[in-house]
Image (tube, rainbow, N blue to C red):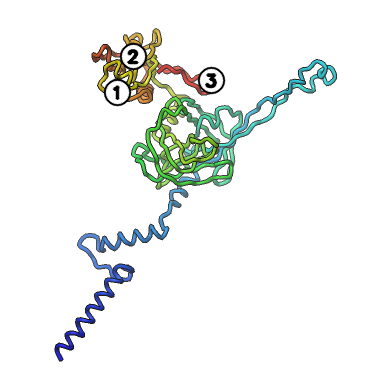
Amino acid sequence: MLQKLWLTFAQVATLGLGLLLVVETLRPDLLPLRPGPASGSRPEVQARASAREAVGGAISYSTAARRAMPAVVNIFTSKEVKKRRPPFMDDPVFRRFFGDAGEADTQRSSSLGSGVIVRPDGYILTNNHVVRTADEIQVALNDGRQARAKIVGLDPESDLAVLRVDMNSLPAISFGQSERLAVGDVVLAIGNPFGVGQTVTMGIVSALGRSHLGINTFEDFVQTDAAINPGNSGGALVDTAGNLIGVNTAIFSQSGGNLGIGFAIPAHLARKVMDEIIQTGGVTRGWIGVEVQDLTSELAESFKLPALHGVLIAGVVKGGPADRAGVRAGDILIGIGSKAVGDSSAMLNLVAGSPPGKATTLKLMRNNAELIVTVAVGKRPKAKPGGDADEDN
């Protein structure tokens, strides 16, 4: 009798444990959570619950979008241009019968872009190429309001511009810490692509520190695969909290459409330019008066350099700061102040960031010997009309 009872108990216990294992595996949410020593719930059950939420599509960036979208504006620009006059209008016979009726007339050309409200008192950050040729700028807010904008200042070399509208209590965006971005971080791009209206796209940070693209004089781009199309220029690249971490600037495309390679100016660099424009109306950068060339393996071998580190001084502006300091063509510049020079782009940024009027040191290699000279940094000449900067650094 006892043997039969024991056999029945063992079968029931085995069946119960089997059922518990099935429920634990497939539906752990049906089991009561047993308190642990620290958090009061089982961490492994919480982790599985989070995984189910992710698979179920519960992850959303709507909070970030709602926070950032009111600060992103559409920018409509227009300018007056002359119509092209057909050659026959210059014919003496035509002019004899029609007089000056065929004289060239003017028409308005329009384009569109995006911008970001950076201060509640009406300051807007956008790209220089969006507004540089405009003689009329109209801004449309996310809530439907519109206003004319005036240019506060332009910086063609970074492709940034600051506008202002005569409005107060505007929804300004919060700046994020773009210096802490990492490849793989999720980002949202907000703008007005193709004029269809405000649009949000999602992607990740594909690369950091992109330069040598030939887009701007000063380049240190965040690369993203978030869809950026014509009309997005000047719009916001934000993190998953809705903070500004970049200003969308350009795309890599052969067709004009998105190919998953877009570039944004990091927010910490854009903010520095913006603050200087608001304070002084422009940007002042350092200049030493040299032309540089990136080192190749052949050049490094010919100069007997141990590594591809630094830039070749290809030319020195006569009477410029570097010339007065004794820098010569053929020198290898390997350091500025306490910073090492990796390539021409890094060198350009280091020089530009040096305050004009102050002295700094240049670490050079000349005849396989290290040489340190002191140079009084000058003021970088203004960019040439059309946005092209002087080539000298």
| Residue that badge 1 annotates | 309
Rendered view: 26 above or below 155: below
Q: Residues within 10 Å of mark 1 (few under 14, many from 20)?
A: some
Question: Of 57 and 354, which appears nearest the observer?
Answer: 57
- Which mark, residue 252? none
| Nearer to us: label 2 or label 3 | 3
Q: Quadrant of residue 78?
A: top right
Give the CA separation, mark 2 to mark 1.
Answer: 24 Å
Q: Please provide percent x and percent y for residue 25.
A: 30, 67
Give the residue type that dot 2 points to.
Answer: Ala
Quarter of the image containing the N terminus? Answer: bottom left
Rendered view: 324 above or below 1: above
| Residue that badge 3 annotates | 385
Question: Of 228 and 299, which appears nearest the observer?
Answer: 299
Give the CA separation, mark 3 to mark 1.
Answer: 34 Å
Give the CA separation, mark 2 to mark 3.
Answer: 27 Å
The residue positioned 48% from the left and 26% from the top of the image is: 155
Q: Earlier in the sequence, mark 2 or mark 3?
A: 2
Q: Earlier in the sequence, mark 2 or mark 1?
A: 1
Q: Please provide percent x and percent y for residue 380.
A: 42, 18
| Residue that badge 2 annotates | 376
The residue positioned 66% from the left and 30% from the top of the image is: 108
| Nearer to us: label 2 or label 1 | 1
Give the residue type that dot 3 points to.
Answer: Pro
Rendered view: 349 above or below 266: above
* Residue 115 located left or right of residue 77: left
Q: Helix or strand or loop: what does disc 3 sit on?
A: loop
Q: Helix or strand or loop: what does disc 1 sit on?
A: loop
